[in-house]
């Protein structure tokens, strides 16, 4: 029960971080995007290390976020 609650909290924190970085990317401030990307990738790696999410899912999140940041910065 304790692990389930802890994993749920971590997953919620991860979803919030992913949502925040998507908002930052759409907002367009490069400094905040770079900082948010670093923090989010770190969090994704931690979740994968703790097996809250699968390592391939972690890679997919990181890849898609990096591609999204690159597309947005190239368009700007």
Image: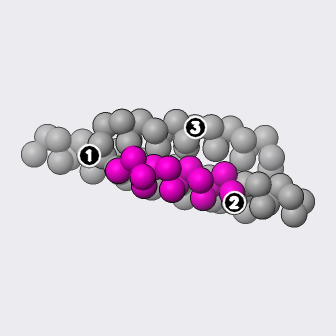
Q: What predominant SS class does the magenta segment belong to?
A: helix
Residue 20 appears in the picture as rendered: no
Q: Mark 3 points at which residue?
A: 39
Residue at position x 36%, y 36% from top? 49
Residue 64 as seen in the image, left or right of residue 9: right
Q: Earlier in the sequence, mark 3 or mark 2?
A: 3
At which x and y percent is residue 27? 75, 59
Q: Is mark 1 on a helix, strand or loop?
A: helix
Residue under label 2, please give it: 68
Residue 21 appears at what percent x and percent y?
62, 52
Quadrant housing residue 50: top left
Q: Which of marks 3 and 1 is nearer the N terminus?
A: 1
Q: Distance between the residues labelled 2 and 1?
A: 27 Å
Closer to the camera in the image, 1 or 37? 37
Q: Which of marks 2 and 1 is nearer the N terminus?
A: 1
Is 31 rendered above or below residue 53?
above
Real-space Cα separation, disc 3 to disc 1, in angstroms: 19 Å
Q: Is mark 2 on a helix, strand or loop?
A: helix
Residue drawn at x 80%, y 50% is: 29
Which residue, as the protein is rendered here, is positioned at the far right? Answer: 76
CA separation in Å, label 3 and label 2: 16 Å
Q: In which quarter of the image is the C terminus?
A: bottom right
The residue drawn where x is 60% and y is 58% is: 64
Q: Mark 1 points at which residue?
A: 7
Determine whether, in the image, residue 55 is placed left or right of residue 42: left
Whether the magenta-drawn stretch holds residue 61 is answered as yes
Q: Residues within 10 Å of mark 1 (few under 14, many from 20)?
A: some
> Which stretch is magenta?
54-67
Task: Please tell me whether residue 8 is drawn above or below residue 31 in the rendered image.
Answer: below
Q: Which residue lies furthest to the front in this view?
A: 56
């Amino acid at each position: 029960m304790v692990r389930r609650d802890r994993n749920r909290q971590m997953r919620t924190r991860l979803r919030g971080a992913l949502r925040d970085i998507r908002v930052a990317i759409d907002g367009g401030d490069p400094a905040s995007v770079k900082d948010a990307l670093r923090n989010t990738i770190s969090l994704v790696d931690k979740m994968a290390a703790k097996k809250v999410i699968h390592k391939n899912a972690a890679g997919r999140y990181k890849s898609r976020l990096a591609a999204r940041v690159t597309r947005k910065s190239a368009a700007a």
